[in-house]
Image (tube, rainbow, N blue to C red):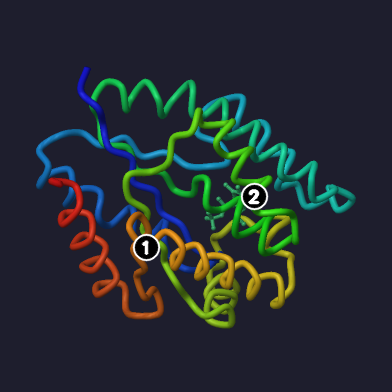
Amino acid sequence: MTKGYIISFEGPDGAGKTTVLNKILPILQEKLAQPILTTREPGGVVISERIRDVILDINHTEMDAKTELLLYMAARRQHWIERVLPAVEAGQVVIMDRFIDSSVAYQGAGRGLDKSEISWLNAYATDHHKPDLTLYFDVPSELGLARIEANADREVNRLDLEKLDMHQRVRQGYLELAKDESERIMTVDASQDLETVVDATLGHILDHIGK
Ligand code: TYD
């Protein structure tokens, strides 16, 4: 059994990680000469997409922070078992748009829940797996929020309604994670123009994937 390779894309809302992912995908596919599985959290499989709808429904304003965390974890578990793990076991490269670090940044730093408990739940949901490589797209909160507002096509979800200070705490959470796990997490300055961000992202991936 060959082991695959998991890359996660992380960052505050408005960092542009999904746009970058769509840009690098065809280039990376050609360079690696193999199909790459891309998927997203929360969601990616039917059950997790349904949990996603519950989490992100703008009407669910009474949702408790721990309920929110546990729903993300439930979505994560199902997505992991049904989609990600089989691909990794088949030797595939998987790129995930958000994964375990989102819970530490959003529910931990953002909502103030205990980070060690979140790490425990992450390990429980993924049977102790972590990404081989994480790209963290860093952007100042004001710029991230301005980008969200400028993007008319983007669906507005419950977390988009949070105020600037929540976004700032999320960013701080990511910066701390990137410092604590500097071997795994590579920071990309996502305030730069798209082409520069795409090049930096490809550079990190191609540097790491062969090792
Ligand atoms: P989404 O529309 O996918 O946002 P983005 O395109 O920025 O990834 O919505 C996902 C939202 O869920 C986003 O605001 C981040 C949040 N989130 C958490 O709070 N915790 C988590 O564990 C995950 C996976 C996402």
Tag of residue 116: 2
72 left or right, relative to 17: right
Residue that protrudes farthest toward the right in the picture: 62
Alpha carbons under labels 2 and 1: distance apart: 18 Å
Q: Residues within 10 Å of mark 2 (few under 14, many from 20)?
A: few
Q: Residue at x 59, y 45 (%)?
A: 119
Q: Secondary structure at mark 2?
A: helix
Q: Residue at x 25, y 27 (%)?
A: 3
Residue 32 image position (x, y, % from top left): 12, 42
Q: Residue at x 36, y 39 (%)?
A: 38
**Between 43 and 107, the one nearer to me in the picture:** 107
Residue 117 image position (x, y, % from top left): 68, 45
Figure check: 111 above or below 99: below
**Between 66 and 190, the one nearer to me in the picture:** 66
2 left or right, relative to 164: left
Q: Residue at x 50, y 28 (%)?
A: 127
Residue 147 image position (x, y, % from top left): 52, 75
Residue that protrudes farthest toward the top in the picture: 1
Q: Return the disc, 2 or 1, that comes first in the chain's sequence.
A: 2
Amino acid bearing label 2: Ser
Q: Quadrant of the N terminus?
A: top left
Residue 130 image position (x, y, % from top left): 42, 41
Tag of residue 182: 1
Amino acid bearing label 1: Ser
Q: Secondary structure at mark 1?
A: loop
Q: Residues within 10 Å of mark 1 (few under 14, many from 20)?
A: few
Figure check: 92 above or below 90: below
